[in-house]
Image (tube, helix red, strand yellow):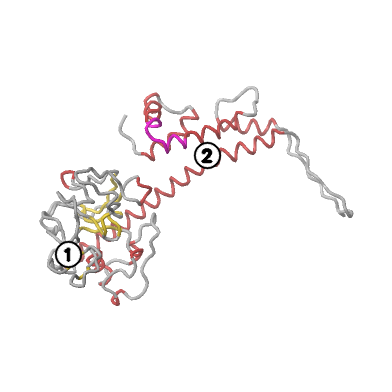
């Protein structure tokens, strides 16, 4: 059985309770439940939902879950009738008496099942839709980059860099000019190649920028950009000569926040397997140098397994570092 992603296992939970899994699928899911506390909690909630259905017994018990629900509703008998008087006398109270506990249990069981099965499914569909919109955003940005490169002698969007004075990391040093890495990417908006809406991932809390693009040299607010762009402070990849599968854009980097390294997540010689905070941490969309938008479940998705969040052989970041080769991905804002 091929390796499955986290959200694939969640889809199998309902099938587990319906008895619709193959032996291999059941074994793989049970193994995953032992290692994944969050999935185990979802399994427990779904087990409680199914247990509510078992609280009312109907003979004979149908084999299918949905047949069991329908049978229990039928077993409760006709629904209670509510008669409303034409004229309500002063002080008179009308009460509705339910036929039995069964009609309550049957309706409650269906509500619990809808919450236990339906809501996770709807959330999963919403996330899949957001992921597709995000991928389409990156495809639009990729087309804008290709158009920019055609007009700029093969260069990716690049606003210039002075390694002696500039820093992509925020600083209060008056002798340092802060130029966030996102300023390079903003050129696509400024020259009208990509709309501001394309730079906001639907899984984030970002909002598209407003105002005339030519009034700014950068996105006015950090919330106007959800994506991380290749660090342009060092060797810059070229669409004409470098490897087409080189990542140059991604969902936001979880190890850097607004250009500042998150020291709680950076460790000397440590492996950094964290996915982007977008899309629930399940993975990230990447844009490659040749304009393809791809989904990955690991940050080790660069050329030769390069970690796209970090510079090669770097553990400290002052804001002036950049890639030493054109295949070293370092995707930051």
Q: Estimate the x, y position of residue 299 in percent, counting from the top left.
A: 25, 46
Q: Secondary structure at mark 2?
A: helix
Q: Estimate the x, y position of residue 314 in percent, counting from the top left.
A: 16, 51
| Relative to 61, residue 150 above or below | below
Q: Which residue, given by chain and number where applicable, does mark 1 sit on?
A: 149
Q: Secondary structure at mark 1?
A: helix
Image: magenta residue range: 32-42
Which residue is depicted at the point 48% across and 43% down?
A: 120
Q: Is residue 38 left or right of residue 169?
A: right
Q: Residue 2's mark?
A: none
Q: Estimate the x, y position of residue 65 in percent, counting from the top left.
A: 55, 31
36 in magenta:
yes
Which residue is depicted at the point 16% across and 65% down?
A: 150
The single residue placed furthest to the right in the displayed view is 89
Q: Which residue, given by chain and number where applicable, does mark 2 sit on?
A: 116
| Relative to 125, residue 38 above or below | above
Magenta-highlighted stretch: main secondary structure? helix
For the C terminus, give its image quadrant: bottom left
């Amino acid at each position: 059985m091929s390796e499955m992603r986290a959200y694939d296992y969640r889809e199998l939970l309902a099938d587990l309770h319906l008895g619709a899994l193959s032996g291999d699928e059941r074994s793989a899911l049970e193994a995953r439940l032992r290692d994944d506390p969050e999935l185990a909690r979802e399994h427990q909630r779904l087990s409680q939902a199914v247990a509510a259905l078992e609280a009312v017994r109907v003979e004979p018990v149908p084999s299918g879950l949905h047949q069991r629900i329908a049978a229990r509703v039928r077993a409760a008998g006709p629904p209670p009738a509510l008669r409303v008087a034409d004229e309500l006398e002063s002080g008179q109270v009308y009460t509705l008496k339910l036929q039995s506990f069964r009609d309550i249990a049957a309706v409650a069981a269906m509500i619990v099942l809808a919450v236990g099965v339906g809501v996770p499914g709807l959330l999963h569909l919403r996330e899949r839709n957001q992921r597709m919109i995000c991928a389409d955003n990156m495809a639009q940005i990729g087309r804008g980059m290709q158009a920019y490169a055609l007009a700029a002698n093969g260069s990716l969007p690049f606003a210039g860099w002075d390694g002696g004075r500039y820093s992509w990391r925020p600083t209060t040093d008056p002798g340092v000019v802060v130029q966030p890495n996102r300023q390079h990417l903003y050129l696509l908006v400024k020259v009208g190649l990509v709309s501001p809406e394309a730079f906001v991932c639907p899984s984030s809390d970002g909002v598209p920028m407003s105002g005339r693009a030519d009034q700014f040299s950068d996105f006015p607010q950090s919330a106007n950009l959800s994506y991380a762009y290749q660090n342009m402070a060092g060797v810059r990849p070229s669409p004409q000569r470098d490897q087409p599968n080189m990542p140059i854009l991604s969902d936001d980097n979880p190890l850097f926040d607004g250009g500042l390294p998150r020291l709680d997540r950076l460790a000397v010689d440590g492996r950094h397997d964290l996915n982007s905070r977008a899309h629930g941490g399940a993975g990230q969309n990447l844009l490659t140098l040749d304009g393809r938008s791809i989904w990955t479940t690991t940050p080790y998705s660069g050329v030769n397994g390069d970690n796209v969040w970090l510079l090669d052989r770097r553990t400290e970041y002052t804001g002036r570092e950049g890639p030493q080769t054109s295949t070293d991905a370092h995707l930051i804002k």
